[in-house]
Amino acid sequence: MTEPTPMLMAAVTALLFGPLLTGLVVYLLPSRRLRDIGPVVLAIGLLGPLWHLGTEVVGAGPLVLALGGHFAPLGIELHVDGLALAMLWLTGIVALAVNVYVSASLPVDAHFPATGFRALWLILWSGLNALFMAADLFNIYVMLELTALAAVSLVVVSRGPEAVSAATRYFLFALAGSLFYLLGVALVYGQTGLLSLRVLETSSWGGPVSLLALGLMTGGLAMKAALFPVHAWLPRAHAVAPSAASAALSALVAMAGAYLIIRLWLGPFAGHWPQALAQGMAALGTAGIVYGSIQALRQSRLKLVIAYSTVAQLGYLLLIFPIASLLAWQGVVYHALSHGLAKAAFFLAAGNIIHLLGNDRLTSLSRRDHRLAGSVMVMALSGISLSGLPPSGGFLGKWWLINAALESGQWWWALAAAAGGLLAAAYVFRVLRHALAEPHPDAARDAPIADNLPRRMFWPPMLLALGAVALGFAGQLLSPVIRIGLPTGVGG
């Protein structure tokens, strides 16, 4: 239990309501310039609350905050441990980059609802912050619904029949996922009368009903996270959404669903599932790695390559369940962080290419246009992390995960992780090969639609990609943080 200080409560309140209120205020700001600057100022300002929250967690351990002064099971709690803190920081950094990027990239077009896009993105950001701090099953459901509605709206905001079709598919998957999750919550509450993750984790309960509830909730969250084989909404949604929205969907929204699966399996449901089920989850993760990578190798459009890469990269997170060691925990969390930075950078770089060329066909990359050089560099740096090449954060996460698998005697999962890195290198190098190849006849016919790339569109993806690589040098600094408040399902 945590005795909140005024500064701590102010920091939490700012993270929960700052983006939400700003999303409402952008409608009232009189000029486009103010609407551009407002979210950027907010993102910079929220780095202070994030820093204060981090110092509290590092200094005092996991935070359990009671809203209204009543702790669970009577009241509603917020919970911030090392994992939640890492995800909040990832969200804050990606949000800052997206806000700066959006300030220069949204089209000045009467047919594009730029103000609506900003508002929806800010609401999504607020929902993600609340989701990562939520400490009970029902409030997680509420935040899942808020983020899903905002995310679906960001897909359809670009309009057109393809956007409507992709958003409809996403909405149906999200709706089905919500129903499965809520049914699982009902089973848990019916058996225990509890919703608090913390109280459930320390209570004696279980049996076939708990296993059924876990299966339903995992299936629902897998749909929201686009985990293989329930990933069908993600590639089409990424292909038609504005690139800034694609960056948020891949780096944060899909990751949030996987985050919750890990929370549930290793927290309140730890010890409720047989090892065979954990092996099955890791097998699904491996299948996702292979399938997503092969599909990425087959695509002719850059955003589809990146989208299927997300399906593949999320599969790594499921490898933790049969291993469930401290080293595997570090590897999975570090993989999530490096993937979030690298994938957001990759999508924003794709947006820059679309801004310059008007399309994202891989053959168009062979123009050898000097204006594409920066975006190609971003894709190369992001690809280093996604492929798990040293010295990137992706390398460190995969290295820890491979070593954890070998230490547990489960060499086959180490092989799966290593093979996934090779497959990732293959589709990244395929993209770079197009960028460095002789000009394709189709590329020669493409007329550039923009003369230059604004610096506010160049630097956000570049800094994100550099951050994904720099994470490889910060393992000794960050690993103690992500170990704060380990769930009971993580062994030594």
Image (cartoon, rainbow, N blue to C red):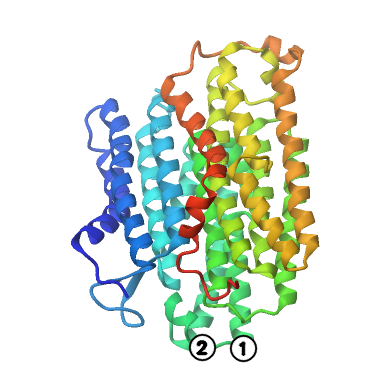
Task: Tell me, for residue 309, which label it has, or none.
Answer: none
Secondary element at tag 2:
helix
Residue 348 higher or lower than 410, as above or below: above
Residue shown at 51% from the left, 38% from the top: 467
- Residue 116 at x, y = what percent? 37, 38
Residue 164 higher or lower than 74, as above or below: above
Residue shown at 23% from the left, 34% from the top: 29
Residue 327 higher or lower than 304, as above or below: below
**Position of residue 181 in the picture relative to residue 429 (left or right):** left
- Of residues 113 and 269, the one nearer the viewer is 269
Task: Tell me, for residue 207, which label it has, or none.
Answer: 1
> Could you tell me the amino acid type at mark 1?
Gly
- Residue 42 at x, y = what percent? 29, 41
Q: Check if mark 2's residue and mark 1's residue have beta carbons within 8 Å.
A: yes
> Could you tell me the amino acid type at mark 2?
Gln
In which quadrant of the rendered image does the N terminus lie? bottom left
Sequence-first disc among 2 and 1 = 2
Secondary element at tag 1:
loop
Q: Residue furthest front?
A: 476
- Residue 197 at x, y = what percent? 45, 75
The crowd level at tag 2 (other Cα within 10 Å; few <14, some 14-19, many 20+) is some
Identify the image quadrant of residue 431.
top right
**C-alpha gap between disc 2 and disc 1:** 10 Å
Q: Which residue is mark 2?
A: 191
